[in-house]
Image (cartoon, rainbow, N blue to C red):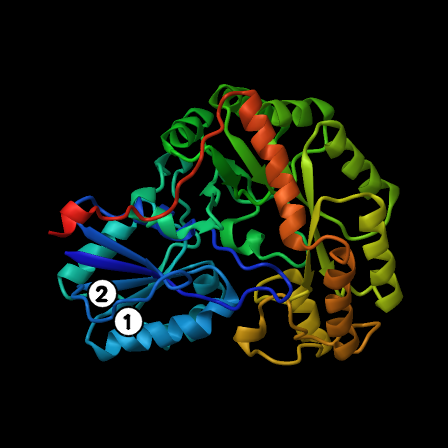
Amino acid sequence: MKLKIVYPSWPKLERQTEFHLPPHGPVVFAATVPEDVDIIFEDDNVEQINFDEHVDLAAISTMLTCQLPRAFEIAAEFRARNVPVIFGGISTILHSEEVALHADSVFLGETEGSFSKVLEDFENGRLQPIYDYMNDQPDIGLIGPARRDILKRELYNYRGVQMLDLVHASRGCKFDCFPCCSGFLGGRKFRPRPVDKVIAEMEQIPNNRLFIVDNSLAQDRDWLIELFTAMKPLKKKWVSHPILYDEEVLKLASEAGCWYVYQAIFDTSDMIRDRIKMLKDFEIGIEGTIILGLDDQDVDYIKRLVDFLCENEVDIAEFTILTPFPHSPIRQQMEKDGRILHNNWIEYSADKVVFQPLKMTPDELQDVYYYAWDTFYADSGYELRMGQLFQKLVMREIADNTYKRYDTRKPRRSISAKK
């Protein structure tokens, strides 16, 4: 049997330099497919999809809401060629009823231990329209190493710099942050993977640079200490979402190779200032993640927030516009208040205003979004600031003898090989 996994493209953030990381969802999913299935993977962001290649089943993996319009186009192309299509992934779960209109089958939930049943049904001509495993989460011990061998690695580089490999050490999130869907998607119970299995997977990844994509590394102090202690001998360099603000934990994270973290900066309080200082004390870089359009913000507030980032010398910043995704707490409230402007999913890309702000007009919020990017990067653009962070990374790699040049170019054929 031949299965083609496709990852649809989506519009990237305005003002941010475009780059492409190897996707995580498709390679984690591929690890749950039986070994006798021939897998082909195509990433619509970096290559053209070959619709004419013979395959038995197309699996479309979606992560973002703004991927859906392109995903539906892709599904239509396959179905026009009589290739059945199954959807799965984060935004598939969030929009399952709409997705079902464009699919032969929809998978909801985590695929470990269950996708072989889907393939069995398919091969016996009884593929079901819905497979709902949302309330049947698999044993966390079933999660094995992702199938990174299906990636075309030469496609994931920026100006010759190898992009980070993605890996996850846990699932679920006990926090219920108002703009986030994680509680609905993976449950509000923290589910850490066994540390030895996480380390074994990291050891298999040839890339020395990782992105630990867990929802939060601030959920279990003892587990974090165990994880970072075990990671230290690997000498990997990595980035992550916020880490627990605890001196022992941050010290271990730095020693284990933490390069920088994504730090949510939502106000100019002493708490945020102290967090920035603590990360710097442990030589951990900071990418500020700043959501614009919160109900307590007006235009002047956002301008002061940008000044705060500059004053505290945050390394880089990613500005986004508050986006009320389905099944997030903020969505429920805004629907109740009648503040959702439209459901044109292509604009749910976190750089377009799709709701009515409380203290601004939609146009004012859109304009101050551009102001934030342009002002923060006025003296040194995103590429230069990112280059400075990479310089620190390289110096750390040289210091512990892990630096290597990543030649991501396709090998040239020799003259003799052409004969």
Residue matched to label 1: 104
For the point 34% across and 43% down, the residue is: 148
* Residue 299 or residue 373, whichever sits in front: 373
Along the viewing direction, whichever of 316 and 31 lies nearer the viewer = 316
**Which residue matches tag 2?**
127
Crowd tier of the residue under label 2, counting other residues whose Cα lies within 10 Å: few below 14, some 14–19, many 20 or above:
some
Q: Residue at x 42, y 50 (%)?
A: 156
Which of the image's four quarters has the N terminus? Answer: bottom left
The answer to whether one can see residue 27 in this image is yes
Query: In front: mark 1 or mark 2?
Result: 1
Q: Are marks 1 and 2 in contact (CB under 8 Å)?
A: yes
Residue 159 location (% of width, % of height): 49, 50
Q: Please indicate whether residue 157 sits to the left or right of residue 229 in the image.
A: left
Where residue 41 appears, as percent x and y from the top left, is: 29, 56
Quadrant in the rendering for residue 104 = bottom left
Q: Is residue 339 left or right of residue 137?
A: right
Identify residue type, mark 2: Leu
Residue 262, image quadrant: top right
